[in-house]
């Protein structure tokens, strides 16, 4: 047991990836980095172990699960009914809202912001690197495995979905004819993704199309997967042209292709195609909301995003970007059209809107999370920017 704990602790410290040790019932025994045992709901650990067993895995055959929106979790079985969870990790950087979405299902409210801040600081990790880390962990703990022994499952896409508007449209097209997708159709999809325009994207997807698809495989399922890869390639490049960082776009495309590769039913791949396009479109839309800025100011904006729940002032930002306070203030205002304090308030209030819509945090808890000195001051600032008090906003969104 001591060797297991030392190995997990060292690997977590070196890789900056969370490790957790659980018993056979999914109860948390220890985490690295250190985290309060009450900070994870018992059901989250138990669900991971249950999934491992449902997939009929064992000590020589670990599991990696995909969790929406875009996270990976490794599960390794040890001796004496012990399990190591490796992750959550992701191939690309997530927004705070996306992290809150997944953390809200596994972390009690009192620890949600702490957990969110931890994931925001975590470096990206691809599926292949996670497999390498699992192999190394198993080897150091006495079991030799290869990357081919690790099963990757996508529990999100594998769920049976009801027939949606997208399912019906795509099914009817496939039944009527195998058609070449017109160039205009591809151009419209790419234009919508590049613009971050979901309405335009949906209109293009559901518009009737004529033509004949080129047969890339005699196997229908493989044909659908090849088509998926083509769309992933087109949409990732369109997203890059729309302003999404190239590494984020490529990592997102890789992950979606890996998810599609695991699917065994054509309707599920079609649903995943729609999800992928909307995801790229949404990420470009978020990028386009952000004012264009120089590398120095971008560095400041990234720092503000990661440290939003901490006291942030001009002094910290100056040290971080290497400019004196006056130069930074002038440059910030010149490029973004607002001062540093106003921008920080705006970002904090966007976070507050998310918490008011999607959690049952009290106003005092949100005030504390966002580091406002008092609830009355938070209410005053919120109303100034939003036109409503926080409670009025929450009631209106309910």
Image: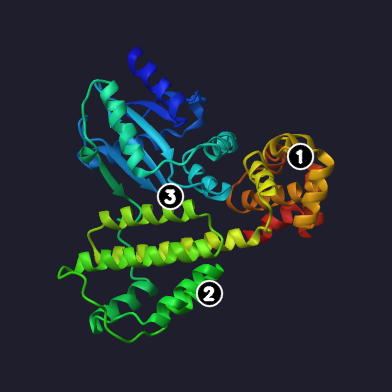
| 1 vs 3, front mark | 1
Q: Say what secondary structure mark 2 lies in.
A: helix
Q: Say what secondary structure mark 1 lies in.
A: loop
Q: Position of residue 149 (x, y in %)?
A: 20, 38
Camera-side residue: 283 or 99? 283
Q: Say what secondary structure mark 3 lies in.
A: loop
Looking at marks 2 and 1 on the same chain, the residue that comes earlier in the sequence is marked by 2
Camera-side residue: 165 or 42? 165
Q: Could you tell me how far apart the alpha carbons at marks 2 and 3 are, in whole angstroms?
A: 23 Å
- Residue 212 lies, with reference to residue 100, above or below; the image says below
The residue to which callout 3 is attached is 70
Q: How many marks?
A: 3
Q: Residue at x 30, y 63 (%)?
A: 268
- Residue 125 lies, with reference to residue 33, above or below; the image says below
* Residue 24 visible here: no
The residue to which callout 2 is attached is 199
Residue 267 sits in which quadrant?
bottom left
User: How many neighbours does mark 1 have within 10 angstroms: few (below 14), some (14-19), or many (20 or more)?
Assistant: some
């Amino acid at each position: 047991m001591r060797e297991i704990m030392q190995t997990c602790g060292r690997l977590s410290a070196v890789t900056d990836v969370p490790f957790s040790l659980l018993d056979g019932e999914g109860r948390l025994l220890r985490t690295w980095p250190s985290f309060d045992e009450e900070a994870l709901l018992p059901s989250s650990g138990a669900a991971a172990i249950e999934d491992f067993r449902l997939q009929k895995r064992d000590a020589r055959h670990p599991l990696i699960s995909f969790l929406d929106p875009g996270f990976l979790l490794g599960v390794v079985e040890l001796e004496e009914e012990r399990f190591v969870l490796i992750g959550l990790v992701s191939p690309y950087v997530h927004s705070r809202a996306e992290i809150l979405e997944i953390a809200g299902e596994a972390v009690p409210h009192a620890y949600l912001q702490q957990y969110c801040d931890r994931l925001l600081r975590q470096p990206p990790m691809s599926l292949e690197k996670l497999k390498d880390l699992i192999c190394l962990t198993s080897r150091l703990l006495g079991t030799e495995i290869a990357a081919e022994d690790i099963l990757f499952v996508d529990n999100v896409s594998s769920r049976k979905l009801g027939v949606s508007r997208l399912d019906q449209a795509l099914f009817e097209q496939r039944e009527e004819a195998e058609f070449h997708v017109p160039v205009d159709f591809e151009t419209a999809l790419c234009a919508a993704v590049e613009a971050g325009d979901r309405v335009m994207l949906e209109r293009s997807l559901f518009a009737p199309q004529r033509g004949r698809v080129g047969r890339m495989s005699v196997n229908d399922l493989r044909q659908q997967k090849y088509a998926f890869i083509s769309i992933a390639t087109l949409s990732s490049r369109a997203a890059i042209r729309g302003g999404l960082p190239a590494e984020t776009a490529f990592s997102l495309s890789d992950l979606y292709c890996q998810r599609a590769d695991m699917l065994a039913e054509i309707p599920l791949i079609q649903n995943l195609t729609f999800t992928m396009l909307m995801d790229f479109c949404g990420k470009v839309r978020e990028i386009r909301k952000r004012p264009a800025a120089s590398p120095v100011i971008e560095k400041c904006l990234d720092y503000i995003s990661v440290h939003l729940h901490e006291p942030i002032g001009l002094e910290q930002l100056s040290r971080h970007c290497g400019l004196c306070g006056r130069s930074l203030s002038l440059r910030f205002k010149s490029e973004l059209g607002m001062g540093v304090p106003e921008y920080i308030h705006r970002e904090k209030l966007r976070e507050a809107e998310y918490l008011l819509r999607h959690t049952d945090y009290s106003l005092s808890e949100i005030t504390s999370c966002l580091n406002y000195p008092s609830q009355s001051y938070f209410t005053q600032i919120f109303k100034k920017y939003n036109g409503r008090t926080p409670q009025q906003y929450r009631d209106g969104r309910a």
